[in-house]
Amino acid sequence: MASAYREEQICQYLNLISLPKIYHPMPSYSSQKTLEFLTALHTHQISTIPYENLCLHYSQKKEILLDPQALYEKCMKNGRGGYCMEASIFFYHVLRGLGFETYMTGVRIRPRVGGVPQGDYLGWVHIVNIVTLDDGAKYMVDVAFGGDGATKPIPLVDGQITPNIGTQELRLVYDRIPQQTSQSQRWWIYQYRNSVEKEWNSFYCFSEIEFLHQDFEIMSYFASTNKRSPMTSTVLVVKFLRGEGEDGRVYGKVMLVDGEVKINTDGKTRVVKVCKTEDERDGALKQYFGITLEEEEREGIKGMSTELSRK
C-alpha cells in the first residue's frame, strides 16, 4: 500500500519534528532504511506529537477520524496528536512515504490492577507497526502506547533486552498466552521491568498478521465509544522528553491525567501541577504540551463527566 502523504507533506512533517538533517533523504527518500534512521524518527515523533485523547472530551462530536488526511491535518497544528490508532496510522503513512517496508497489526493488552498489568488479555484495542529494515531485521514500532510505551524500536528477537527510560528495560518474548487453547500458536509478548532486580511484567501481545484499515475503524469505534473504555472516562495526554542534539535521547515524559500534571525522569515521577478548573487545565495543556485548544473545542467539554468542575 502506498503512503497517503505527498512528498511535500512528508517534508513538512520532518521539519515539524526537528529531525536531524542527516536523516532528511530529500528529495527522493533514497536514504538507507537503517535502525539509526528508524530510531531517530521514533524518538522525534513521540517527543513532538503527543499521545492524547482530547477529541473524546474537547469536541462537539466526540468522534475519532482515522482518515489519513484528517490525521495529518490534526497532528500538524496546535501541538495536537492522537491516541493509539490515530498516531500509529499517521506514523505508518509517514514510514511508507519514506520508503520503509512496514505494515500494521492489532494488539491485545492486559489491564492495570494496582498499577501493574494483570489478568486476562483483552480484545484488539491497540496497534503497532512492524518494520523490516534493509538488512532484513524486523522491529516492532509503537509510537502510541502512552507513558508505558517503548521509546525506540524493539527487535522481533525472542528475549533480547532493550533499555528504556531510566532503569526500565523492555523485551519481546515469543510464547503462548494463558487464555489460548491452541498449543501451536505463539505471540510476541511485550514485557517490561523497572530494574534488573524486578520481575518482568507482560503488558500486551500481538502476532505478525497484517491488519487492514477497516479493522482499526472497528477497534477505534469500540475504544472511543464504549463506557468501559478508559478513553471515554479519563482525559489523557503524554509527551516524551528528548535531549538536545542529533543524538538526543528520550530521558523522560510529561503526563496529564484528568487534572493532574506529572513529570517522570530517571524512573521517578513527581506531580508538578493540580488543575482545579478548566481554565487551569487549558493553561497546563499550553505550558507543558504546547497544545492550543480552539474555543469550539473548549466548549465541547461542558456538561461532560470529565469536565473539571463536575469531578
Image (tube, grey):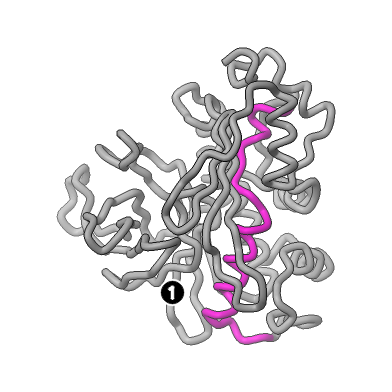
**Whether residue 173 is situated above or below residue 148 in the rendered picture:** below
Work out which quarter of the rendered image holds the C terminus and state it. top right
**Whether residue 191 is situated above or below residue 135 in the rendered picture:** above
Residue 36 location (% of width, % of height):
55, 80
The reply to whether residue 234 is in sight is: yes
Residue 175 location (% of width, % of height):
22, 60
> Where on the picture, by quarter, is residue 161?
bottom left
> Where on the picture, by quarter, is residue 188?
bottom left
Work out which quarter of the rendered image holds the N terminus and state it. bottom right
Residue drawn at (65%, 76%), measured in percent from left and top? 99
Residue drawn at (79%, 40%), measured in percent from left and top? 292
> Where on the picture, by quarter, is residue 25?
bottom right
Residue 102 location (% of width, % of height):
54, 68
The residue stretch that appears in magenta: 31-59
In this view, the residue in front, 57 or 1, is 57
Q: Amino acid at mark 1?
A: Lys
In this view, the residue in front, 52 or 281, is 281
Asked whether, in this view, residue 198 is left or right of residue 164, the answer is left
**Whether residue 105 is situated above or below residue 132 in the rendered picture:** above
Q: Is residue 44 magenta?
A: yes
Residue 151 location (% of width, % of height):
50, 62
SS at mark 1 in the image = strand
To which residue does mark 1 refer? 138
Residue drawn at (78%, 81%), measured in percent from left and top? 26
